Every structure is written in C-alpha cells, then in structure tokens.
Image: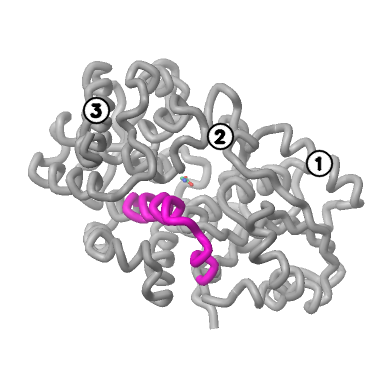
Amino acid sequence: MTNSIKVKTREHAYRIHIAGGLLQKSGEMLRKLFSPQTHIGLMASKTVEKYYRGPVQDSLEKAGFTVSFFRMPTGEENKNMETVSSLYDALIAKGFDRSCLILTLGGGLVGDTGGFTAATLYRGIPYVQMPTTLLSQTDSAVGGKTGVNHPEGKNLIGAFYQPEAVLIDPAVLHTLEMRERVSGYAEILKYGFIRDREFLDRCIADRQKILELRDMDYLGGVIRRSLEIKAAIVAEDEKEENIRMLLNFGHTVGHALEQSSGYGTFRHGEAVLAGMYAALFLSMESGSLDRRTARHYMDGLTSVPLGVSPGEIDTAAVYPALSRDKKRRGKRLKFVLLDEIGKASVAEDLPGDLIRESISRTQKAFCREKGQ
Ligand code: GLY
C-alpha cells in the first residue's frame, strides 16, 4: 500500500507515491502507467548507482521493461547545458524516441537535468522522478521545474514540464549524509513558514527525530505534508505567475549566497535556511511580522547546524548576486515575506539598505552561533 497525493495542473495530472521499499517495486508501479515495450533511460550518479541501480533495474526488468543506464555527473558545476547536450547525444545514439521514458533516480541535479532533457528532446518525452535526497523528496522532484544553471545564475535555463509520476522511498535516506538531510529539512520548514504554523512548530520540535531518520512512518508523514502544501500551490499556479512565488521563501538571499560563494560551497537548503533568516528579518523590519515572533523563529533557525558559515562569504558579493534573481522584474526585486507564521506574501521595492542589512545580520547571526 502506498500513500499517494495527486498533483493536478491545467494540462496534466499525476500521482506522488510515498512508501518505504518503493524502490524495489518501481517496475510494478511503472507497469500501471507504461507498456512493457517501453524503453527506459535510467539516469543516476555514480554514488546513487552504487547503492540503488541494482534493485531498481532488477525491478524494471522483471516487469518486462528494457533499460539503458546513463551515468550522470555530480556537482552543481555540472548542472549545465554541456551535461544536457551529452545526454541528448547518448539518448539519440541508443535510439530513444517519443515512446521512451526517462527515469531520474537521484537528487535535484539528476532530477532537474534529466527532467530538462526529457522536456526538450523531441519537444518532450515522458519522465518519472525517483528522488533519493530529502530535498528532492520534499521539493524539487514535484511541480515540474526542470532546468540547468547558467554561469550568470542558478537555474536560469529551464522549462516547466511535469513528470508522469513521482516515486518516493524514504528508506533510501539512510545513505544520505547529514548536510544533505539538513538541506532537505530547511525546505520542510519553508512549507511550515508559508502555510502551516502547527506543522512548522512540530518539525522544529522534532528536528532530531527527522534528521536522524528515527521513525520512517513519521518521516513519510512529514514528506507527505510538505508535498500536500506544494501540490496545492502548484495546482493553482503551475508557471509561477503568482502564488508559486511563495515557495521561494528564503530563496532570494539563499540563491545569492549560493552563487556568490561559488556553486557547491553551500548545499541548496543550507543557503535557503540562511535566506529564511534574512526573510524573517525583512518581515520584522518592514513591519509585517511582529518582532517577538520573528526573533523566536530566527533564533530557531540559527540553532540548526550548517556545514558552512554564511559569515565566510563577502557581503559585497551577495548583494549584486540578488540582481540575477528570476523573480526580478526590471530593476524591481521581489521578496517573499511573512504577514504571520503560516501566511506569506510577495513584497517589492524594499529599500536597498534594508536588504543589505538583512544580509549582514544573517551572516553575523550564523557566525555567532558557530562561536566566531
Ligand atoms: N522549489 C520551488 C518550486 O518548485 O516552485
């Protein structure tokens, strides 16, 4: 029995299935959607290949599918058009056509890059996401954002292209290093901040239980709640014309931190966590969120251990990186702020000095916690 959530956009509907051991049942699950004649391009990095290619490929072949494997590079610096171009070459060489299926097994890099390849090869072939990190299980594998980085900014090239299904097996998180777990945890907190205070408070109180993967059923419930929030938002606004922007809470400063420090210094969620601190500060200083509440949650964020200190980044480099934010319209930067915990809105035209101050306050806050 899997736990499933429906994602419905204007032109497409699919299900997210969540269950421990789903990896070993991937063939059976995909047989409900695809004929056994389907040629599957299974994409994974070398590390994920080592742990999980065997069980997935066995299950797919047992279900009758033909499988070709494509090894993906690792590292944010390889999330680019060269990787996509090599995938086009390899898929075409193997005779892939529109009747084939791409199956991405891995974290955000594999999902976003494989998804973008699926979105653009032959003007679109079907794909299914099997996310293996906490961040991709709670965020990036759902909602159809596919794409790659450009030297000028993160995810600047991409397409909204929805998968045919998302298969989530929380049991695979055991092989995930702690920094990656924290990275996914930040996105979980994000859903609470923008939509569900009770969920947020529970996830803050249960931080260790979540990060140490103490209870798989509980964790499955946390993933489910995160994705229910995401699915509802994506159903209303697939192309990020309005409320989907709320899913970028903490991401404006987060992306700028990631970019100005060089891709790979921060895990994405670590930068988002610091970015949420900046967003709480801005919410407080612009008067939308009361000070006591903001302070309480800001202190909570600084107690989460990050593998990198935002304080080590040159503030002067972070501010200009904001100008490459995708939410920007002309010179106007957009920030997701909180009106209350669990209720977010988009603000424009915040004073530049206040934005600069939010960055330096964030850097100081995380330095202090690290005893620097
Ligand atoms: N990760 C934010 C979104 O999918 O819109």
Asked if the residue under mark 2 is in contact with the one under mark 1, i.e. CB atoms within 8 Å, the reply is: no
Give the labeled residue for mark 3: 358
Considering depth in this image, is 85 or 163 the residue closer to the camera? 85
> In this view, which residue lies farthest toward the left?
292
Identify the residue at horizontal 58%, vertical 49% (top origin): 144
User: Looking at the picture, how far across and down is residue 351, in whole percent?
Assistant: 24, 18
Q: How many marks?
A: 3
Q: Is residue 173 magenta?
A: yes
Left or right of 43, for residue 219: left
Label 3 CA crowd tier, 10 Å (few <14, some 14–19, many 20+): many
Ranked by sequence position, the earlier of labels 1 and 2 is 1
Which image quadrant for residue 211? bottom left
Considering depth in this image, is 69 or 139 the residue closer to the camera? 69
| Badge 3 amino acid | Ser
Identify the residue at horizontal 65%, vertical 36% (top origin): 78
User: Looking at the picture, how far across and down is residue 2, in whole percent?
Assistant: 53, 78
Residue 362's label in the rendered image is none
